[in-house]
Image (tube, rainbow, N blue to C red):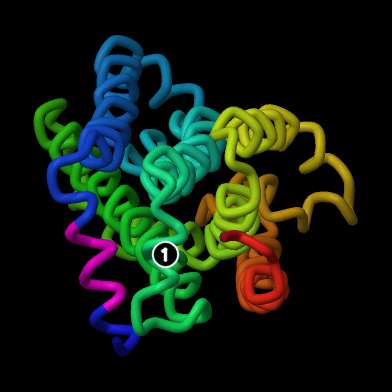
Amino acid sequence: MRLPDVFATEVYKQKNGIMWWLVIGGPLLIAGLIFIDVWVRYDYLLTKNRSAELGPWGIMLGEAVYLWAMFMPMGITLIAAIVHYREFSENAWKHLLSLPVTRGSVYVSKWLLIVLLTYLAILFLMLGFFVAGKIIGLSAPFAFGSYGRYALYQAVGALGIISIQHWLSSRFKNVIMPVAIGIGLSVCAIFLAQSKVLSFFPHATILYTMPFEGVENNRPLLSGLIAGPVLLVLGLLEFRRRDIV
């Protein structure tokens, strides 16, 4: 089987699972919480942030930064765990790897699935923000440039997190282990982000995705473009050598 066929099979496995509640419901829940926050405190926030010239749509992004920066790595952690859970829970690794597929295509297809689901979550977050702003009645036109950059920085920065959590979820049969590690790293992200060196750690870089002046957006870009592929290759090499069956 070719990689596209294996990938299609991985997508089909998630057709009727709980994955979609996480991928769609999670971002919309965050957008809903930000909607309530901005709707209730709009006049105060507008006065508070006027000097920064963020504009109403920028204010909404500013309110989301810490909440989403913690939820997104946790979401990726859960997505990766769910993608791998079926193989471990049903002892399906032996059957899967006995098919005419390479270990490389299996590992990469699961990684691509996690990437796809993560990007869908980012898309639904942006849609949620757009709808929330329209319901509130923000006077300014939608800030396509700022929100587009925000989505791009997240999409790139997430690659490192995806590669780490993908490998952890493939490595441990007990799903609690990769989830606990991922949540622990997500909680520690705020502290890691305060260090000039550790702020490049994938789980911490989401804090630097805000498209505002003075925010060092090079962190998620460099971390994602370097850590993402490198950790994917290292994980793939380990997966090929591992005695699974």
Q: Nearer the viewer, residue 147 or 30?
A: 30
Q: Residue at x 42, y 42 (%)?
A: 85
Give the residue drawn at x 46%, y 83%.
102
Identify the residue at image location x=12%, y=31%: 137
Main secondary structure type of the part rendered in magenta = helix
Q: Quadrant of residue 134?
A: top left
Residue 76 relative to residue 7: left or right: right
Q: Is residue 153 left or right of residue 145?
A: right
Q: Residue 219 at x, y = what percent?
A: 70, 62
Name which residue lies at 59% across and 62% down.
163
The amino acid beneath tag 1 is: Lys
**How far across and down, in percent of the image, does residue 234 sit?**
72, 74
- Secondary structure, mark 1, is helix
Q: Position of residue 173 (x, y in %)?
A: 58, 41
Residue interval drawn in magenta = 6-12
Vertical arrangement, residue 84 with respect to residue 63, above or below: below
Residue 116, visible in the rendered structure = yes
> Which residue is nearer to you in this view: 68 or 245?
245
Outermost bottom residue: 2
Image coordinates of residue 188 in percent, x first then y, are: 75, 31
Give the residue pinned by disc 1: 110
Q: Specify the quadrant that holds the C terminus.
A: bottom right
Q: Residues within 10 Å of mark 1 (few under 14, many from 20)?
A: many
Q: Is 105 positioned to the left or the right of 132 in the image?
A: right
Q: What is the quadrant of residue 31 in the picture? A: top left
Quick one: quadrant of the N terminus? Answer: bottom left
The reply to whether the magenta stretch includes residue 10 is yes
Q: Please say if 88 is above or below 8.
A: above
